[in-house]
Amino acid sequence: MRTTRKQIEAKFRNVIEAAGGRVATSYNDVGGFALDHNSVYGGWRIVQITNEAGGERDLCHRMQGSNFWQALDLFGSVLYAIRKTEAETKAA
């Protein structure tokens, strides 16, 4: 399956927001999470903006689109399981 930029960006936004984070709106959006893509250097990675000058912290190594999609899928599934367990514990 070919994974498009639009699909990856949408899944990234969903996972970050479900985790309680926020997607950066610009290079100086301190605390926000951003996608970085560069096909020459190996694909996609997630960074967190650390200062107003655009400094960033790598949160994963670069991955090709299909592998990155699977990683986002895994994170989303784990997050869902954690939230479900928390809800069941509170209800008990």
Image: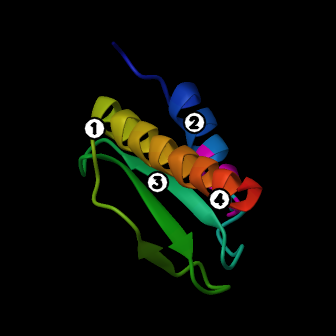
Q: Earlier in the sequence, mark 2 or mark 3?
A: 2
Q: Secondary structure at mark 1?
A: loop
Q: Quadrant of the N terminus?
A: top left
Q: Secondary structure at mark 3?
A: strand
Q: Residue at x 47, y 23 (%)?
A: 4
Q: Earlier in the sequence, mark 1 or mark 3?
A: 3
> What amino acid is at disc 3?
Asp
Q: Residue at x 57, y 83 (%)?
A: 50
Q: Earlier in the sequence, mark 4 or mark 2?
A: 2
Q: Is residue 46 left or right of residue 19?
A: left
Contact check, label 1 and label 3, Cβ < 8 Å: no
Residue 34, quarter of picture = bottom right
Residue at the front extreme, as displayed:
92
| Magenta run includes residue 17 | yes
For marks 2 and 3, give the CA distance: 14 Å
Q: Which residue is mark 4?
A: 89
For marks 3 and 4, give the CA distance: 37 Å
Label for residue 36?
3
Residue 73, quarter of picture = top left
> What amino acid is at disc 4?
Thr
Q: Which residue is mark 1?
A: 64
Q: Residues within 10 Å of mark 3 (few under 14, many from 20)?
A: few
Label for residue 11?
2
Q: Secondary structure at mark 2?
A: helix
Question: Closer to us: mark 4 or mark 2?
Answer: 4
Q: Is residue 42 left or right of residue 70?
A: left
